[in-house]
């Protein structure tokens, strides 16, 4: 049965017919919670906590609320009126939003903790993985998020000085995940001359392989609408060097075939180098974790060896009264996990503030699947 399609239809119809209304709490607890970061994890936590009767403030350093739903994922994949609708519903329920406010800079983490009964860190995992090979500092080589954020702002007619644009250019994208796919779709919309994605690993199968039967999570090529629209994917491609022109801008990439070595490592195979023309390069190589500096220096936050904010099974960090959810505590993941974690963490925050809770607890930080209980 097409469960996903049924759920989408129910949700869309409910929105169209105006069945999704604000749920205003019947009593206030007098407790206050600050949620830092307004991506899906922060929004989910804030909505549950507001509905439980707490007074909730959401702080966001961007000029608009929504996190990666707003400025990462392009409109062709998710239209922003859906985010706006949820924000309006939350405002009507009583959640307060403070955009253009960076915690750690405009307000310190320590001052925030002192002012609120609890704090939820939902700041995402925004530190991009770099590729420190020769030529990296040439013009025209950008982190994918710089391109996507600017493009999302331009779509809503914001003024974006010196916007990175792909019109008439040979675009090369390093990395084959969701971020890379969003760059493909955006570059095509800008009118790129060619769009090539380079993936360092082996070609992934298009269909579920026999050794990974349902319900296992198979490693297959995630074909998105952006891939269907065009562009080429080259597998086993290790970037060795960027070459530039006389103006200091990127002109080409030197790429070698990836070899898998006996010690388990992989790298460029000597003697297989070739050149790929490139006027614009986007690094979509994933994220190394949460931003640590101010959390560490201002409240002594502890982090895992993988760059995430450390936490217990109850979403609590090592700092009393501070919780963490979504990509900040889990590492770069998916919207569905961010929402599930936000809702679960809200129940733990409610329990911390009130001694007990009636909010649902859908998922533990370590769970691989979402429990339906
Ligand atoms: C380009 C791209 C495409 C993606 N596509 C998909 C997809 O198709 N499907 C899917 O399921 N997932 C996708 N993902 C992953 C998904 O977007 C994330 O897993 C999800 O948004 C994480 O939610 P979050 O709330 O934890 O963090 P985020 O959405 O990253 O939000 C964190 C927010 O915190 C704010 N912030 C950070 N520090 C501070 C501070 N000090 N003070 C105030 N605010 C702060 C940031 O500005 C940001 O708005 C994609 C990710 C990217 C980058």
Image (spheres, grey):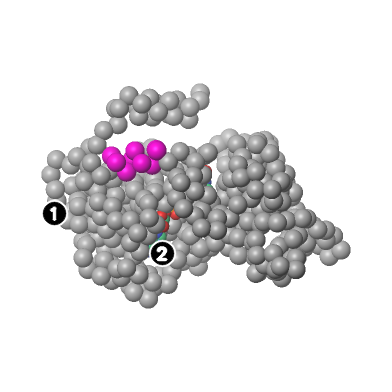
Left/right placement of residue 159 relative to residue 56 reads: right
Comes first in the chain, label 2 or label 1:
1
Residue identifier under label 2: 310
One can see residue 288 in this view: yes
Left/right placement of residue 150 relative to residue 18 reads: right
Q: Nearer the viewer, residue 92 or 140?
A: 140
Circle 2: element type: loop
Q: Nearer the viewer, residue 117 or 183?
A: 183
Outermost right residue? 271
157 inside magenta stretch: no
Examine the rendered structure and indicate whether residue 315 appears above or below residue 22.
Answer: below
Left/right placement of residue 327 relative to residue 271 reads: left
Residue 312: percent from the left, percent from the top? 37, 60
Q: Counting other residues with Cα less than 10 Å from the Cα at mark 1, is it few (<14), some (14-19), or many (20 or more)? A: few
The structure residue drawn at horizontal position 28% and vertical position 71%, both measured from the top left corner, is: 110
Q: Counting other residues with Cα less than 10 Å from the Cα at mark 2, is it few (<14), some (14-19), or many (20 or more)? A: many
Circle 1: element type: loop
Q: Nearer the viewer, residue 213 or 40?
A: 40
Outermost bottom residue? 297
The quadrant of the rendering that contains the C terminus is: top left
Residue 313: percent from the left, percent from the top? 37, 56
Question: Which stretch is magenta?
Answer: 81-89
The structure residue drawn at horizontal position 76% and vertical position 60%, both measured from the top left corner, is: 252
One can see residue 144 in this view: no
The quadrant holding residue 231 is: top right
The image's mark for residue 30 is 1
Closer to the eye: label 2 or 1:
1
The structure residue drawn at horizontal position 30% and vertical position 70%, both measured from the top left corner, is: 108
Residue 129: percent from the left, percent from the top? 58, 63
């Amino acid at each position: 049965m097409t469960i996903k399609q049924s759920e989408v239809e129910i949700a869309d119809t409910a929105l169209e017919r105006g069945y999704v209304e604000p749920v205003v709490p019947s009593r206030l607890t007098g407790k206050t919670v600050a949620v830092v970061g307004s991506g899906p994890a922060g929004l989910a936590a804030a909505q549950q906590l507001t509905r439980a009767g707490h007074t909730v403030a959401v702080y966001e350093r961007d000029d608009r609320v929504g996190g990666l739903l707003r400025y990462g994922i392009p409109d062709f994949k998710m239209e922003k009126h859906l985010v706006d609708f949820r924000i309006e519903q939350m405002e009507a329920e009583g959640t307060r939003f403070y955009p253009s406010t960076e915690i750690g800079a405009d307000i310190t983490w320590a001052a925030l903790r002192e002012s609120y009964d609890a704090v939820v860190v939902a700041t995402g995992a925004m530190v991009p993985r770099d590729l420190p090979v020769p030529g990296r500092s040439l013009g025209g080589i950008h982190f994918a998020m710089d391109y996507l954020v600017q493009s999302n702002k331009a779509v809503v007619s914001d003024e974006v000085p010196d916007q990175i644009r792909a019109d008439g250019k040979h675009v090369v994208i390093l990395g084959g995940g969701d971020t890379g796919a969003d760059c493909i779709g955006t570059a095509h919309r800008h009118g790129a001359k060619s769009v090539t994605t380079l993936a360092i690993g082996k070609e992934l199968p298009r269909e579920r392989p026999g050794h990974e039967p349902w319900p296992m999570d198979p490693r297959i090529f995630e074909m998105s609408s952006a891939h269907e629209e065009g562009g080429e994917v080259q597998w086993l491609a290790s970037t060795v060097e960027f070459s530039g022109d006389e103006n200091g801008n990127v002109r080409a990439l030197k790429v070698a075939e990836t070899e898998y070595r006996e010690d388990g490592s992989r790298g460029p195979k000597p003697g297989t180098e070739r050149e790929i023309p490139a006027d614009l390069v986007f690094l979509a190589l994933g994220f190394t974790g949460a931003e640590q500096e101010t959390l560490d220096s201002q409240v002594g936050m502890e982090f895992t060896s993988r760059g995430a904010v450390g936490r217990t099974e109850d979403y609590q960090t090592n700092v009393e009264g501070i919780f963490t959810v979504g990509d900040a505590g889990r590492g770069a993941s998916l919207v569905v996990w961010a929402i599930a974690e936000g809702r679960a963490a809200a129940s733990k925050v409610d329990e911390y503030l009130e001694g007990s809770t009636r909010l649902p607890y859908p998922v533990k930080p370590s769970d691989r699947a979402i429990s339906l209980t």
